Image (cartoon, coloured by chain):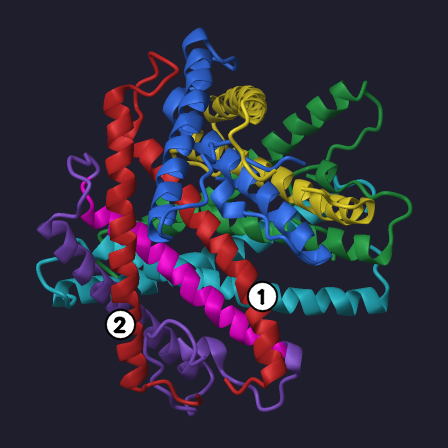
Chain colours: A cyan, B yellow, C red, D blue, E purple, F green
Amino acid sequence: ANLTQAEQRELGNRMEKKQMKEFMNMYSNLVQRCFDDCVNGFESKSLTSREESCVMRCVDKNMKGSQRLGDRFQEQNAAMAQSGGLPGR
Amino acid sequence: ANLTQAEQRELGNRMEKKQMKEFMNMYSNLVQRCFDDCVNGFESKSLTSREESCVMRCVDKNMKGSQRLGDRFQEQNAAMAQSGGLPGR
Amino acid sequence: ANLTQAEQRELGNRMEKKQMKEFMNMYSNLVQRCFDDCVNGFESKSLTSREESCVMRCVDKNMKGSQRLGDRFQEQNAAMAQSGGLPGR
Amino acid sequence: MSFLFGRQPQMSSEQKIAQAEAEVDMVSDMYTRLVGSCSKKCIDTSYREPDLNKGESVCLDRCVAKFFEVNVKVSEKMQGEAQSQAGGGAAGAGGGRFGGGM
Amino acid sequence: MSFLFGRQPQMSSEQKIAQAEAEVDMVSDMYTRLVGSCSKKCIDTSYREPDLNKGESVCLDRCVAKFFEVNVKVSEKMQGEAQSQAGGGAAGAGGGRFGGGM
Amino acid sequence: MSFLFGRQPQMSSEQKIAQAEAEVDMVSDMYTRLVGSCSKKCIDTSYREPDLNKGESVCLDRCVAKFFEVNVKVSEKMQGEAQSQAGGGAAGAGGGRFGGGM
């Protein structure tokens, strides 16, 4: 996109903030998802051991899932970039 | 809201960015919605012809739907503005 | 987090905007939630009296719910802060 | 929703712009939610045809009207409560129009 | 979640403010999600009465407690993994309090 | 999606940065949606094991491929319509890559 060095630097600064935000969003998503999927009884105010281990496996599995999805996403993106089809760049 | 010309201009600049963002959001919504509604088998890594035509009709129908909703939304908004009821403006 | 007075002031300014945004978000959430939960027939273009009273109770109940959740949230947050466990602060 | 945007007598230029911006954000947020809710309630997800059929079209129209009505009700209710908490006074029906008088 | 907000020794004024802002955003995002999840799990959507009944109230209270507990678990787990990836060291239990010490 | 980001001949520095930013936002929004949709479609929520099993892994891989394909279709369709509205001309297939060439 033909940015000058100074523009690149400014963009980099803004990206840093965004990455932080995205990481936080990913984290909150994970908390909410595992809470929603694993916690369904409210007879007590503490997690049952069953709920707790569900949460642990949920975090594990979903982190591996996001990792895998991220890898595939980048591959596809790179493949698309190679095959061209994006005029004017 | 009694903005001066300079204020109007500044607001206009910010609105431009927002419109871009909204359009992008509308676009992503459409992709996700039609993906969620039409793609449900993962026996292959390519869309089946059935899925593909579902996606096409989904895009068509939802774009017409948003168009219609947008038209009605503006009419209602205008009607409300006419009937007053908004003190202090 | 060791902010100077000037920094505190700047942070305060930004918080004001955020609070406005959050309140608006809470409001829209409430409208959408009560609409989704209470309005399910489209034989007429006006709310039926049944739908209307459902909306009213929905607003009441959910506002009380958020209030209660907010109170508990703050208590938990305070309790966690007391029990320490947050190094480097 | 005018209770959300009561105009203060003396606002700085930046504050006035920020407020106008907030009103636009509110309208656009409401519109996004309305599209989400009404599409879900009215559009058949089997997508047998690319066009809206009569039933879907009518449903969408009524859905917008009802969504506005719900907005008015919620707005009035919250305004009423804000006022009764503030000890009455300062009337203002409010109404449920989305967005400002720009 | 303190692993999210490890304080660097030398931060500019803008960085310090941005970090404080990010912490507030995190708390408010978590609160929004908690309201969404707990309302859904605990509040009966037939809305027969305008008040929370006993069951709903108790459910909401416990829901908050459990949501915090899940947050602590996830936070500890991710911190553990971040540390084992970084080759151990730099202890810090973290805990699941939402938000900073402002 | 290049129709979203057609480059104007003369852009100010701020505009160029803002556009690059918008492209990054678009990619990251799409990625977030893809994670949401594909996790929901492929991951069994009973969480009996902490690892992805074979079926889940294959499902996730294919899900990404199909999500991209849908994106390409939607992009082409909207581009086609934008062009037919603009009276033809100004070719450009576009394709569905998420994000710019940075």
- In screen coordinates, is E3 left or right of D6? left
Q: Amino acid at mark 2?
A: Gln
Spot occupied by residue B58 in the image (x, y as percentages of width and height): 50, 23
Residue beneath label 1, please? C14
Per the rendering, the mark at residue F71 is: none
**With A78 as the anchor, is C89 left or right in this view?**
left
Residue A89 in percent (x, y) is at 81, 47
Q: Residue at x 44, y 58 (%)?
A: A66
Q: Which mark is residue C76?
A: 2
* Secondary structure character of the magenta stretch overall: helix
Q: Is residue E49 above or below residue D88?
A: above
Q: Nearer the viewer, residue C85 or B81?
A: B81
Instruction: Check the image and report above or below for E22 versus B15.
Output: below
Q: Residues within 10 Å of mark 2 (few under 14, many from 20)?
A: some
Position of residue C11 in the picture relative to residue A43 (left or right): right
Residue A67's spot in the image, x, y percent?
Answer: 46, 61
Give the residues drawn in magenta, as a range.
E15-44
The residue sitting at 46% across, 16% down in the picture is D61
User: Does the magenta portion include E33?
Assistant: yes
Mark 1 belongs to chain: C
Q: Residue C31 occupies which quadrant of the picture?
A: top left
Badge 1: few (under 14), some or many (20 or more) residues near its Cα, within 10 Å? some
Q: Is residue F102 left or right of residue B28?
A: right
| View extreme (front): residue | D89
Q: CA distance from mark 1 to mark 2?
A: 25 Å
Q: Is residue C75 magenta?
A: no
Q: Position of residue D90 (x, y in %)?
A: 45, 45
